[in-house]
Image: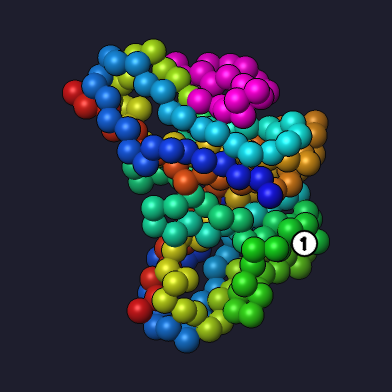
């Protein structure tokens, strides 16, 4: 079965510092990877997809099939980045959308 | 564009009682998902519909949970009888579900259930 792991429950960084949220997955085929974010009192929303290869709010993520990882990175964290971040995997197009346990990012002033 | 609508937002019930949650997906979205999110954990898929057919319900506790999407639009998730461990946020999500429109799912705000 597909599985997504996020080893850090909580990550605290200072404003302006680089941030990396780790995500590893287990799946032998070619999955589609996503990062979803949940700001305080808001619904879960898509941050970015690996297929798009775009930068959203300064965040980027590269799919590394050799290491089965999809880490989320931002060079300079902002206080408004504080939120819960979930890595997710989809296989068989639209099927089996699996989420990781999430990492809470706290950006300190 | 209106988002995924869910109701009620909050519900407190006693164990062994029943509860029902309603979801109206984004217009035109063929795929509808129900997720359970227990505090401190990521969302866990309970059931996935494509139009009014079930695609995946492998993690739905069928002895107490049921869901339907009779006309392929809105959906209802029911729990009967509820147990203490059912306390969670129940998230509804939807997507176009076809390769040309992108495989992105959109979430509702969730229905918070507390079983006492």
Q: Nearer the viewer, residue A24 or A54?
A: A24
The N terminus of chain B, quarter of image? top right
Q: Nearer the viewer, residue A93 or B33?
A: A93
Q: Is residue A105 above or below residue B74?
A: above
x, y percent for residue A102: 44, 42
Q: Is residue A59 above or below residue B107?
A: above
Q: Magenta region, mostly helix, strand or loop?
A: loop
x, y percent for residue B24: 62, 57
Q: Residue at x 64, y 67 (%)?
A: B60
Asked whether, in this view, residue B47 is left or right of residue A10, the answer is: right
Q: Is residue A88 above or below residue A73?
A: below
* Among the 4 quarters of the image, the one containing residue A91: top right
Question: Where is mark 1, residue-wise?
Answer: B54
Task: Give me the chain letter of mark 1.
Answer: B
Q: Residue at x 54, y 21 (%)?
A: A61
Identity of the residue furthest to the bottom in this view: B16
Asked whether, in this view, residue B66 is left or right of residue B111, the answer is: right
- Residue A39 visible, this angle: no
Dot 1: element:
strand
Identity of the residue furthest to the left in this view: A109
- Residue A60 visible, this angle: yes
Q: Residue at x 25, y 19 (%)?
A: A15
Give the magenta-colored segment's residue range: A48-71
Magenta span includes A56: yes
- Neighbor class of circle 1 (other Cα within 10 Å; few <14, some 14-19, many 20+) is some
x, y percent for residue B27: 68, 47
x, y percent for residue A58: 44, 16
Q: Nearer the viewer, residue A88 or B99?
A: A88
């Amino acid at each position: 079965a597909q599985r997504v792991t996020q080893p850090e429950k909580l990550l605290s960084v200072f404003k302006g510092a680089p941030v990396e949220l780790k995500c590893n997955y287990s799946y032998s085929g070619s999955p589609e990877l996503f990062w979803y974010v949940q700001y305080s009192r808001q619904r879960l929303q898509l941050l970015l997809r690996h297929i798009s290869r775009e930068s959203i709010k300064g965040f980027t993520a590269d799919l590394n099939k050799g290491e089965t990882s999809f880490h989320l990175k931002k060079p300079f964290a902002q206080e408004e980045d504080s939120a819960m971040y979930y890595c997710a995997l989809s296989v068989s197009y639209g099927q089996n959308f699996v989420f990781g346990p999430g990492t809470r990012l706290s950006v300190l002033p | 564009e209106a988002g995924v609508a869910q109701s009620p937002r909050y519900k407190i019930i006693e164990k062994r009682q029943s509860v029902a949650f309603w979801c109206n997906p984004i217009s035109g979205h063929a795929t509808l998902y129900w997720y359970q999110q227990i505090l401190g954990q990521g969302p866990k898929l309970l059931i996935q519909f494509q139009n009014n057919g079930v695609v995946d319900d492998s993690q739905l506790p069928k002895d107490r949970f049921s869901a339907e999407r009779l006309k392929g639009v809105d959906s209802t998730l029911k729990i009967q009888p509820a147990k203490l461990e059912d306390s969670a946020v129940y998230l509804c999500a939807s997507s176009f579900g076809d390769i040309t429109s992108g495989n992105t799912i959109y979430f509702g705000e969730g229905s918070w259930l507390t079983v006492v």
